[in-house]
Image: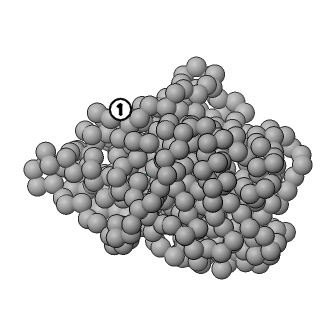
Amino acid sequence: MKFHSTRSKTPTLTFSDAINEGLAPDGGLYVPEHLPTVDVSGCCDAKLSFARLAEKVLAPFLNDDPLESKLGEICSQAFDFPVPLANNTSWPFPVLELFHGPTAAFKDVGARFLAQSLARILETKNTEATILVATSGDTGGAVASAFFERPRVQVKVLFPKGAVSPLQKHQLTCWGKNISSFEVEGDFDDCQRIVKEAFSDPVLKKKHHLTSANSISIGRLLPQITYYAYASLQFYEHNGKPASIAIPSGNIGNSVAALLAKRMGFPIDQIAFCTNANRAVRNYFETGNYQGFPTIKTMANAMDVGNPSNMERIFWLYPSLSALKRDTVVSQATDAEITKTIEQAAREFKTIWCPHTAAAGHFLLNNIPLSEWKNWILVATAHPAKFADSVQPILNGVPAAPQIPIPSQLTQIAKRPSHYENVSARLEDFVRQAFDRH
Ligand SMILES: *Cc1c(COP(=O)(O)O)cnc(C)c1O
């Protein structure tokens, strides 16, 4: 299987090389030259473990790649935590819980697969790499955790000042060794711009072997297909019909992965892009013209993206808006609606949703008729304990609300000391601080 840029069909390269490159030289994002299709009944058994199913789902993408023979061990080591399609009689719909990894958010899945893959690529090539990662909150922690103490890799994390939760900030800054963290005087789009500018500087890129770990990296995107394959097969086995899936969305990598799973033939019906007050996707659905907007800060901060990079992959998958609208819907939730949803979930369903999950919960509870709730899966992208500072005050107003459980991986992280530097939102300042001084 070969990969090419969303902006041109040539040149083509392997999965390993596409991972190494990060962003394509023409500024586009890497995509596979075609989508493998699965014969769901023959290929994949809903009883396979997640790691083994992931291996089957990803195998065609690594066909003829130097990593092909390593895929089994990569999946075993990356996917060593559960991704349950959880259900409970007091809940209105099953919940795909993607928060059981080391940093308690779904980005662990992609980051860990990328780390395992890149480690092997660098070893084979006997070379080193520097990963630049812009984060709106969760990516940086997942990437830092996945690459911490891995030989041959330096990680530089850029996060926006004042826009991440205290626990997220700690997860971004508690590593040291091969991980360094930078608090940028700007928003997430500034962080992402600095990373893009660094990549489009060929001298800088070559000198530091820069590579990307943002959701633009194909090495993070493809593994995210696997949990949609896994959940949709379980749903199908249980209900005898394809699942519709409500996905908390920001840079929309997670939704693109679900669309890829659908297009590969997994039993998926509708996909809902559930966004917060940031309205680029909604505006595209309403006007047919895509444009980015300045980022709006919300309580679902990992979705605070004014100009989602992965729209390029949407246009590649769906050249026309009318085709996109056949497979997807878009919704928005304001902070007030997110708050109300967290309250309702605690009161009526005795469960706690993080603000991102609640944005998708809002869509299901308010836009889908009660009689159709059973057709849907709600995707829970982070554990609520990561956002206890905003969730706990809401629960305080709910009589007999459940307690927020603290997962053990978060307790471990909280014990580590934190280190970071402040930096302006200019590439040259970042380069001076991150490279020249070290
Ligand atoms: C990153 C993130 C999102 C948004 O995912 P995208 O792939 O950027 O759309 C949603 N929820 C949480 C908790 C996240 O960390």
Taking 70 as reference, is 6 above or below it? above
Front in this rendered view, residue 158 or 207: 207
Taking 404 as reference, is 331 above or below it? above
Q: Quadrant of the N terminus?
A: bottom right
Query: Which residue is located at x 80 percent, y 74 percent?
Result: 126
Query: Which residue is located at x 64 percent, y 71 percent?
Result: 116
Q: Given the current orientation, which residue lies at the most extreme right position?
A: 11
Query: Which residue is located at x 13 percent, y 45 percent?
Result: 397
Q: Given the current orientation, which residue lies at the most extreme top position?
A: 287
Q: Quadrant of the C terminus?
A: bottom right
Q: Is residue 174 shown to the viewer in this render?
A: yes
CB of mark 1 near ligand 1 (< 8 Å): no
Q: Which residue is mark 1?
A: 334
Q: Is residue 272 shown to the viewer in this render?
A: no
| Residue 437 image point, x, y percent | 63, 55
Residue type at mark 1 is Thr
Front in this rendered view, residue 417 or 396: 417
| Residue 28 image point, x, y percent | 75, 41
Tell me the crowding category of disc 1: few under 14, some 14 to 19, or many 20 or more residues within 10 angstroms, Cα based. some
SS at circle 1:
loop
Query: Which residue is located at x 87 percent, y 52 percent?
Result: 12
Residue 174 relative to residue 7: left or right: left
Q: Given the current orientation, which residue lies at the most extreme left position?
A: 399
Instruction: Name the image quarter holding residue 196.
Output: top right
Q: How many marks?
A: 1
In the rendered view, how is the structure colored?
one colour
| Residue 190 image point, x, y percent | 56, 37
